[in-house]
Amino acid sequence: MVVAGIMTGTSVDAIDIAVCEVTNEGGRHSVSLCSFISQPFTEETLEAIKQALASTASMETLSDVPFLLARDYATAVRAVPQDKPIELVAIHGQTLWHNPPVSTWQAGCGSALSALVALPVVNDFRSADIILGGQGAPLVPIFDHAMLSSTSLDRVALNIGGMANVTILPRSASLENISAFDTGPGNVWIDTAIRSTFGKRYDTDGHVARAGRIIEPMLAECMTIPYFQNEPPKSTGRELFSDKEARRLITKYSHPSGPLEDVVTTMTELTAWSIADHIARYAPATNEIITSGGGSQNVFLLERLRFHLHKSGLKADLQVHTQWDAKEAMAFAYLGWLTCNGLPGNVPTVTGATRAVPLGSISKAF
Amino acid sequence: MVVAGIMTGTSVDAIDIAVCEVTNEGGRHSVSLCSFISQPFTEETLEAIKQALASTASMETLSDVPFLLARDYATAVRAVPQDKPIELVAIHGQTLWHNPPVSTWQAGCGSALSALVALPVVNDFRSADIILGGQGAPLVPIFDHAMLSSTSLDRVALNIGGMANVTILPRSASLENISAFDTGPGNVWIDTAIRSTFGKRYDTDGHVARAGRIIEPMLAECMTIPYFQNEPPKSTGRELFSDKEARRLITKYSHPSGPLEDVVTTMTELTAWSIADHIARYAPATNEIITSGGGSQNVFLLERLRFHLHKSGLKADLQVHTQWDAKEAMAFAYLGWLTCNGLPGNVPTVTGATRAVPLGSISKAF
């Protein structure tokens, strides 16, 4: 089955669409990428989302968001190359609020998108897990398990997006034996540091961080954030690792006459250390780490990550995922395929839900 | 198939749930009512909805509403008598905003409800019609056509809820040949009048209206509201027939020393006249009018309606629908059944959409 997965993250930078072929051979699922593009939001959609995320949107604007998104998603479906025609679309939707275990809110109208593209659409993947007592996240682990688990290697799937998260895949582990959690910040505080010093959006290849030096007292304070010592399962977000808190630390520790690079170097070091420390503590037998997300393109961050892994005594090979940019969209294509086939998508040991169920809603408005 | 339809109107007074048996014999659909109850909302849900409708809800509250409703709907599903077990649940959801042709917003999470009751759930019935250029309303006409159309009689299905609407069903009419529109206020201004004079919620059996006299200049001003002369298809709501406008009229025309009943009588007269006038203008051949909704229990309103119909030269029989209170919930049970069977639910000649499509989204989180 050819499935398009559409992912729009909390950074609201682009609409990622991955067209995948999903196959099932005797219960062994395979997801291969056919094509992938990143499309911009229209200005109107972007403005409405920004108002919603800033809690300044009117009821009218909030009502409009799922329809604006449906139109933008339809544009992406029409734009992505289709060597084989798409048979199903799965959309994550735009997260406007995430309040587990009470509620979650991913805007994006499946029924409207289905009418626009004349294809079945699956949306609203997180709600069922939430009502069953789960965190509604992470949902990618079932995809990591299907794609990356090995009979001969202990693997970790690492995604470095705004936050960084890991899926721990012991060799030959069944779904019940995997674990997954957020290790802390991914790019979020590195981005805040470079934005507030150089005014750039991100540190390409880690050039800036490489040019600076670690501010040791700043790093030391950051390392005392309790989240890092909390036991998994755990998840975090911009509520804890906020722009405001990063700016407070930067102001407190950067010398007015000192090199601006140093705060970027320090935030990069914190990120590398926190990821390595969690893997060393919770997956010490790891042979291979496969990393994805925007942060996997930060060469200096990966160097520091290798350094800390080695220092912890971990002899794991660190590789960048071949589809580092498309992986999350591919994961939702897979989750949509699971739903369409009546198969569960959440992993209760990972999310905390009372049971595994097929996620989301299917619309066929054509 | 046994289908439960759940309706919660804009008056937010109760959760109506109708369990129906839907059958299909050679393309002839039949919906028979098995059981019907009206359940109260929980206080928490009611408070959240009221904040949302008053545009004072926080993003957190708005995120919570669909989950609070899912829990309340689940309670209703468990409470309704099931001689035959329910196989499908169809929910209208709570309208928080309706902004055709741009967007519409019916809160109520199908995926969460499905997980709670372990049944397939259809929700979000209006979005596809909206994105296809329709008004997303009215959706009941396809049900009226299936249930009430006749080969020997020209019928009108009249629903007197907050607003009043008609479905015009010429004898043997195909779906393309029916029409449906709002005639104007149903109970809304009668209720405002009795609330602002006697502090009661509604005029039981029309007792108050019967005791008063029409304030002729007030009625005359009301009759000049342009909506009444607009050509169908047309729809209206509390934006036009607002509490504020009713209060303005009441203040302007009621004598401080005069009987309080008179404003209730006048609003009842306006409602009866506007319904009769529309039927006389757009369905002059009508033999039978079958009325439903809370207003169908207002005996005096029906008397005045009969008077005006007769005055217009219409010799139609006016009957109260056997399931006058359950009809809308039954209609959504039928719409859910249509969706489940891949059949269209909207009538483009009625809503203005470019085409007829299966409405809503199906969740099977079990």
Image: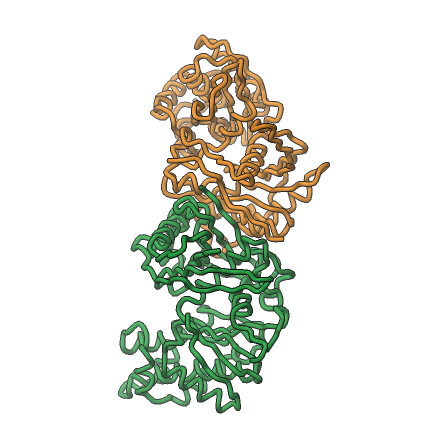
Chain colours: A orange, B green
**The quadrant where residue B259 appears:** bottom left
Q: Nearer the viewer, residue B366 or B68?
A: B366
Q: Position of residue A73 (x, y in %)?
A: 61, 45
Q: Residue at x 46, y 58 (%)?
A: B92
Looking at the image, how many numbered discs can be counted on the residues? 0
Asked whether residue A225 appears in the rendered view, the answer is: yes
Residue most extreme to the right: A83
Viewport quadrant of the C terminus of chain B: top left
Q: Is residue A155 left or right of residue B195?
A: right
- Residue at the location (44% across, 60% down)? B20
Q: Is residue A183 visible?
A: no
Closer to the camera in the image, B204 or B115: B115
Q: Position of residue B233 (x, y in %)?
A: 58, 72
Residue B218: x, y in percent? 41, 85
Q: In the rendered image of this protein, does residue A191 appear above or below residue A311?
A: below
Q: Position of residue B346 (x, y in %)?
A: 57, 62
In depth, the one of B188 and A303 nearer the eye is B188
Front-most of residues B84 and B172: B84
In the image, residue B267 above or below residue A204 = below
